[in-house]
Amino acid sequence: MKKAKKGNDKAFLKLFQTYEKEIYRTAFVYVKNQNDALDVVQETAYRAFKSIKNLKEPVYFKTWLFKIAINCAIDIIQKQKKIIPLKPEFEDLISGDPNEDVLLTMSLKDLLERLSEEEKSVILLRFYQDMTLKEVSETLRIPLGTAKTILYRALKKLRNSEKGAGFYGE
């Protein structure tokens, strides 16, 4: 971390590669296509490398990195204004792991699409990145209470959507 903060590109690259796949998956949920998700990863690396010297607490590197990635994804969405999502069956062909349960993956992606951007951010950071609610609130720069409210609202929305869609044999 010290070498990376001093501008050592090899040290930074090693740190970044630790989270590269997770950043890609998070970006893909936002931008919904492979090319834009790869752009988000590249832009995240660029922005992070440029500003790593400003990172005050190295223990928050992952949190800081994911905040940059989310901002990059949102920037791309705002630039495009209208994204036409691929059908889930095509999305899985592009990004799917052959060992993954395709129906479950499609169901989760469909459920996540029903959330607002802030709800999606909280859910992704909390459950996909295993961040604590405190880390989520710091990453998104929102009060802890607000993060909790958004999380519970999103979970309620997901539960209601799941029941209404008849998932899991209901």
Image (cartoon, grey):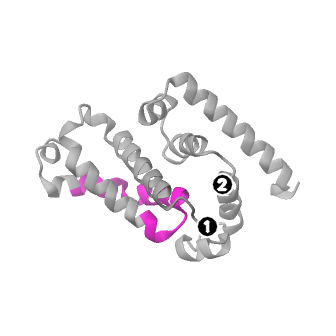
Q: Give the percent coordinates (x, y) of residue 30.
A: 53, 56
Q: Which dot marks residue 85?
A: 1
Based on the picture, tell me whether residue 72 belongs to the magenta stretch.
no
Is residue 135 or residue 119 the one in the foreground?
119
Based on the picture, tell me whether residue 22 belongs to the magenta stretch.
yes
Identify the main secondary structure in magenta. Answer: helix
Left of 41 or right of it: where is 119? right
The mark nearer the N terminus, 1 or 2, is: 1
Per the model, the C-alpha gap separating discs 1 and 2 is: 10 Å
Q: Which residue is mark 2?
A: 113
> Which amino acid is tagged 1?
Pro
Could you classify mark 1 by the number of other residues whose Cα lies within 10 Å: few (under 14), some (14-19), or many (20 or more)? few
Left of 23 or right of it: where is 47? left
Element assignment for label 2: loop
Q: Quadrant of residue 35?
A: bottom left
* Residue at the (52%, 68%) spot, across then down: 33
* Residue at the (57%, 62%) spot, across then down: 82
Q: Which residues are magenta?
A: 13-37
Element assignment for label 1: loop
Quadrant containing the N terminus is: top left
> Which amino acid is tagged 2?
Glu
Q: Are marks 1 and 2 in contact (CB under 8 Å)?
A: yes
